[in-house]
Image (cartoon, rainbow, N blue to C red):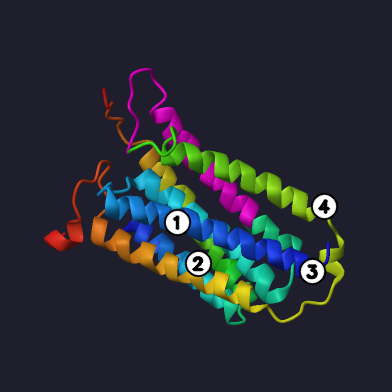
Amino acid sequence: VDQTVLFIFFLTAMLAGWFGGRRAAMTLFGIALVFSVADFFHHATSALTLSF
Amino acid sequence: MTARAAILLNALSLYAVALVLLLALFFQLAWYELPCPLCLLQRVAFVALAVGPILNIRYGPRPSHYALSVLAALVGIMVSVRQVMLHILPGDKGYGSPIMGLHYYTWAALFFVLAIALIALVMLFDRQFADDPSPPPAYAKIAVWLVILITAANAASTLLECGFAVCPEDPVRYLFLLGG
């Protein structure tokens, strides 16, 4: 669900930007980007299952 | 470069992002290759890459809009290079099927680096920032709505795949359809 939320965040940023909320779009973008990096660190440290 | 020319390039970049995301969805559905969390994060970074061009098309080119795309591309590089490193050992077949010899995450890393280089090139032309913004042309509006629709499709697809839980590292079925 974490990536679903991220998609929805960026989708909202796009819609906000397109319908006149430039500042809101940039704020949403910033929040979503920080969450994206946090989610990356969560998954980047997952145990690696070697595929061979 | 005039603002009008910059809008054309921004619209083309949106079509490129749309193509990448559509190809990813196509491989997911046609080959039943479900994206892993890092793969999904790369798609998220592609979606994030599109926010800058949308703002450029709507409000006219501004350095701050290009900066958003550079930040998104940096996140994309971080995620895709991490996945390349996970599968770099000799004998590792990688995650998913290769496309023209390279896996999706390798293509993604190259694409994000290319995006930063192209943004730097476009930003060299100052005149685009001085021109008064004009209403977006039809081809640019279509590009914007195409990316918005594909982003919504990705949100729905990810919900189907992961349900309301954290996505498994090696997904093999759509958890939402199983009641997850």
Residue B58, x across and y down, in percent: 66, 75
Task: Point out the image quarter for the C terminus of chain B.
Answer: bottom left
Looking at the rendered structure, whether the residues under marks 2 and 1 are on a common chain is answered as: yes
Asked whether residue B88 appears in the rendered view, the answer is: yes
Highlighted range, magenta: B69-96
Q: Residue at x 62, y 81 (%)?
A: A20
Is B116 situated above or below B155? above
Q: On what subunit does the disc labeled 3 rest?
A: B
How would you classify the magenta stretch by its main secondary structure?
helix
Answer whether labels 2 and 1 touch (C-beta < 8 Å): yes
- Residue that protrudes farthest toward the front in the picture: B100
Reading the chain from its start, which is encountered first: label 1 or label 4? 1
Instruction: Name the chain letter of the residue that bears numbered label 1.
Output: B
Q: Position of residue A51 (x, y in %)?
A: 27, 27
Asked if labels 1 and 4 share a chain, the reply is: yes
Q: CA distance from mark 1 to mark 4?
A: 28 Å
Amino acid carrying mark 4 in the image: Leu
- Report the amino acid beneath label 2: Val
Q: Could you tell me which chain the residue with mark 4 belongs to?
A: B
Reply above or below: B32 against A5: above
Q: Mark 3 sits on what residue?
A: B3
* Mark number, residue B147: 2
Q: Is residue B78 magenta?
A: yes
Does label 3 or label 4 sit earlier along the sequence? 3
